[in-house]
Image (tube, helix red, strand yellow):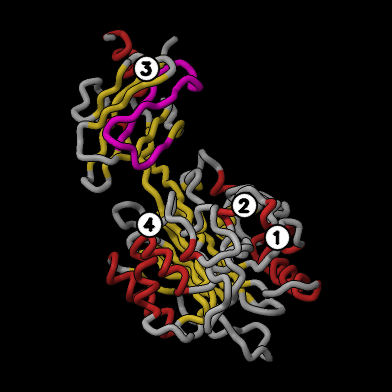
Amino acid sequence: MKKYLIFFLLVIYGASLFAQSDIKIMSYNLLIYPEGEMVNRIDTLSKILDFYEPDLLLVQELKSEQGLQSIAEELSALFGDYKAGTYVPQVSNPANSWRLQQNLIFNEAIFELVSEEAIETPYRDVNYFQLRILEEDGTPSTELLHTYVTHLKSSQGSTNEQLRLSMVEVLNNHISLLPPESNIIVAGDFNVYYGGEPAYESLLSPNGTNTLHDPIDMPGWAGTNFPNQEIFTQSTRLSSLADGSGGGVDDRFDFILLSEQLMNPNARYVYQADSYKALGNNGTCYNQDLIDCSTVDNVPFDLLRALYHMSDHLPIVLSLDINEAVSTIELPFSSESQLIEIAPNPANAQADLVWHGTGPVDLRIFNLQGKLILAQNGLEQKATIDIAHLPLGLYMVQMTDKDAGVREAAKMLIQR
């Protein structure tokens, strides 16, 4: 074992690894917020926000600046300092008497707002926000997050499909002017009925290094024949209440799309695998009220009830992992880690990891070049990991207890 330790120290001297955390994003059609028949809507919304704790909330169907500010105030009361974008009444299609707007609210410990723009389209604005991502110590980084929040024209029929496509074409043109390899989010209520609809296909069409991707890569969806009904978001009600639409969770109207850069596992900010969810949909709820759906592998019933009443849409959520370079000398490398036990070590096909802390923990395994090889969140204090697919060599095992504010790392050798 001593020869392995010497080899390890010689190889990594002066190298870098990555510490990792995440950014939680939610996109939500709030249904003519804050208007509507339901009273105390902010109380209902607060239950949903408190459950997910978004760092970036992208909202559609805003009716007033007061509504936007009430959400920012509620998030600040729950989690700290949050700030909203500037509320601008709809610019596009001034003859339309039914005006709705989009916006965002962000965690000021993670983002600062650099610029914002209401992009005019033939039907409704696309709202664009340029956010700078802050370093862990609060200083500005060089990374920008280009965020588009949209609400495409609703309803079926060729005329409405064409309006959706026209809005997307304006959005795509705006994206084409961004710097190559930009971090881009496009989120909102797209109102598309099938994967072959022109607006959806146009959104995913090649756009240089800023091509957009659907993180779950499920372009074909339709009704009961679609095996992944857990991505459906419209509607939470079988029959419409005083506000909103009925239908009973039978359409995929709501999306978060990410640029090629945010899907690159070697980039600093990258989509966290399997984090894309329609919150409250466990895949068993189809053509029925959300409150009649199972809570098995789902959110608690109190949250289902809040989602049912709050809107006729479910929110889409996902996370971005942050790969942040840190010096290796800041991490404990020795096999005598105080908190991490790896057995066997050297390992072959599997390794047992024991965390001698309070747990649960997030696990990250890096190679000697600092590339993230494996990531698992919320592990219990003892876990078995499959490493049979990993090449022979030395790796860094990093475990983080976010609640306790503790992170520790140890080496693992794979040999066969």
Residue 411 is marked as none
Q: Earlier in the sequence, mark 1 or mark 4?
A: 4
* Total numbered badges shown on the rendered structure: 4
- Residue 85, percent from left and from top: 45, 74
- Helix, strand or loop under label 1: helix
Give the quarter of the image for residue 122.
bottom right
The amino acid marked with disc number 4 is Leu
The amino acid marked with disc number 1 is Tyr
Category of crowding for the residue at label 2, using alpha-carbon neighbours closer than 10 angstroms: few (below 14), some (14–19), many (at least 20): some
Q: Disc 2 vs disc 3: Cβ atoms closer than 8 Å?
A: no
Q: Which residue matches tag 1?
A: 200
28 relative position to 287: left or right: left
Image height of 384 relative to 83, above or below:
above
Q: Which residue matches tag 3?
A: 413
Q: Which residue matches tag 2?
A: 214
Q: Residue sitting at 68 percent across and 65 percent down?
A: 192
Give the CA separation, mark 3 to mark 1.
46 Å
Q: Work out which residue is located at the far front of the displayed protein and give it.
A: 292
Between disc 3 and disc 1, the foreground one is 1
Q: Residue sitting at 42 percent across and 55 percent down?
A: 295
Between disc 4 and disc 2, the foreground one is 2
The amino acid marked with disc number 2 is Asp
Q: Which residue matches tag 4?
A: 134
> Does the magenta segment cover residue 380?
yes
Give the quarter of the image for residue 91.
bottom right
- Helix, strand or loop under label 4: strand
Give the CA separation, mark 2 to mark 1.
10 Å
SS assignment for the magenta stretch, majority: strand
Q: Earlier in the sequence, mark 4 or mark 2?
A: 4
Image height of 179 relative to 380, above or below:
below
